[in-house]
Image (cartoon, rainbow, N blue to C red):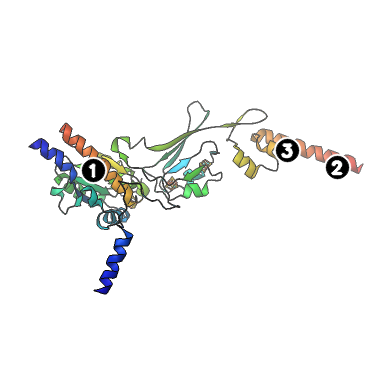
Amino acid sequence: MLKLIQKLVPRSPWIYRLNAGSCNGCDVEMATTALIPRYDVERIGCKYCGSPRHADLVLISGPLNLRVREKVLRVFNEIPHPKVTIGVGACPASGGCFREGYSLEEPVDQYIPLDVIVPGCPPRPQAIIEGVVKALDVWRKRLEEDTCCRF
Amino acid sequence: MLPFLKIMVRNLLQGPSTDPFPFAPAKTPARFRGAAVHDSEKCILCGICRHVCAAGAIQLRAAEDGSGMQFMLWHNSCVYCGMCAHYCPTGALTMSDNWHLSHLGEDKYTFSEDSFVPFGECAQCGARIQPRPNVIVEKLGGRAPDQFLLCPKCKRESLVKHASDTNLSQFREKQ
Ligand code: SF4
Ligand code: SF4
Ligand code: SF4
């Protein structure tokens, strides 16, 4: 039974968006990816959800600045395992244009491990969809191996 | 009723407006700025690209054996502004339209544009100078290409020699 569920569940991942102090560029692109019929991420079974406790994939944008860090980490820890994190944009991967700024503590991945990175500032919606497809593979593998997230 | 029918017929004729990606290739606008591409054959190691890069994505590191410089552009820090390509004097850096850049988190630090640019040699004494590829010779050194390929020391000597030769000949003409 569990095996069957494990096989079926990557067909309908629920996505949670987490804004870690982004400039909103990436958030607009993520909203575009989800809501506009032209890109329509629901074709690959995804659905955006409002609560972190329901989420399977996490889309993170922003460089995790000091002001939101505690709050973001609190929400992030509420997402059940095995969560797959996708860093959208240059910010979560390296800090992007805010790199070496006074409001960040680097590197960002000491707090949030990123499984898939979609570089761009912001990446185009198709690139985000490509990242989600990659994350689905990671998730499938993780379910087969019965592992949690990387940390 | 009639406007609705009009819209319905139009939509039936047009087909779906959804972009078929990821099941079919997506259209890319002609001037889309994707990953930067570096051509080590054209680079003169001037460092302008590193200077203008707002995101600090470009590094130029001297090789350990002193034979050249390692050019590194980290795509995960790049904000795709295109300034480096705009200011590159030789056109060694260009922005491609490649946006298929998503990668796994393990490859985060290796996902970059790396190339090795060897130093040039002075045409006379063989001393180490910045590279002199043809693009920059045509652009800046077209008037005196043999002097453009020299190191500062040889160039100074050749200029002094040239000046003294002309002075001497002018002096002789006057006499
Ligand atoms: S990657 Fe660029 S667009 Fe996205 S949040 Fe950072 S600065 Fe804004
Ligand atoms: S495109 Fe902009 S951010 Fe990227 S390497 Fe060039 S100057 Fe730096
Ligand atoms: S890539 Fe262009 S701007 Fe950068 S060092 Fe080479 S020649 Fe100069």
Could you tell me which residue is drawn at 29 percent across and 35 percent down?
B106
Q: Say if disc 3 is inside 8 Å of ligand 3.
A: no
In the rendered structure, the answer to whether residue B141 lies left or right of residue B28 reads right
Using a 10 Å C-alpha cutoff, classify the residue at mark 1 as few (fewer than 14 neighbours), some (14 to 19) or many (20 or more): many
| Quadrant for the N terminus of chain B in the image | bottom left
Judge whether residue A104 can be spotted in this image.
Answer: no
Residue B44 location in percent, x, y? 55, 39
Question: Of discs 1 and 3, which sits in the foreground?
Answer: 1
- Quadrant of the image occupied by residue A6: top left
- Chain for numbered disc 3: B
**Marker disc for residue B170:** 2
Hey, which residue is sitting farthest bottom in the picture? B2
Q: How many numbered tags mark residues here?
A: 3
Q: Nearer the viewer, residue B125 or B8?
A: B8
Q: Which residue is mark 1?
A: A85
Could you tell me which residue is drawn at 21 percent across and 41 percent down?
A84
Judge whether residue B144 can be spotted in this image.
Answer: yes
Q: Check contact, mark 3 vs mark 2: CB within 8 A.
A: no
In the rendered structure, the answer to whether residue A82 lies left or right of residue A115 reads left
Hey, which residue is sitting farthest left in the picture? A1
Q: Which residue is mark 3?
A: B159
How many angstroms separate mark 1 from mark 2 (CA)? 78 Å
Amino acid at dot 3: Leu
| Quadrant for the C terminus of chain B in the image | top right
How many angstroms separate mark 3 from mark 2 (CA)? 16 Å
Residue A76 location in percent, x, y? 18, 46
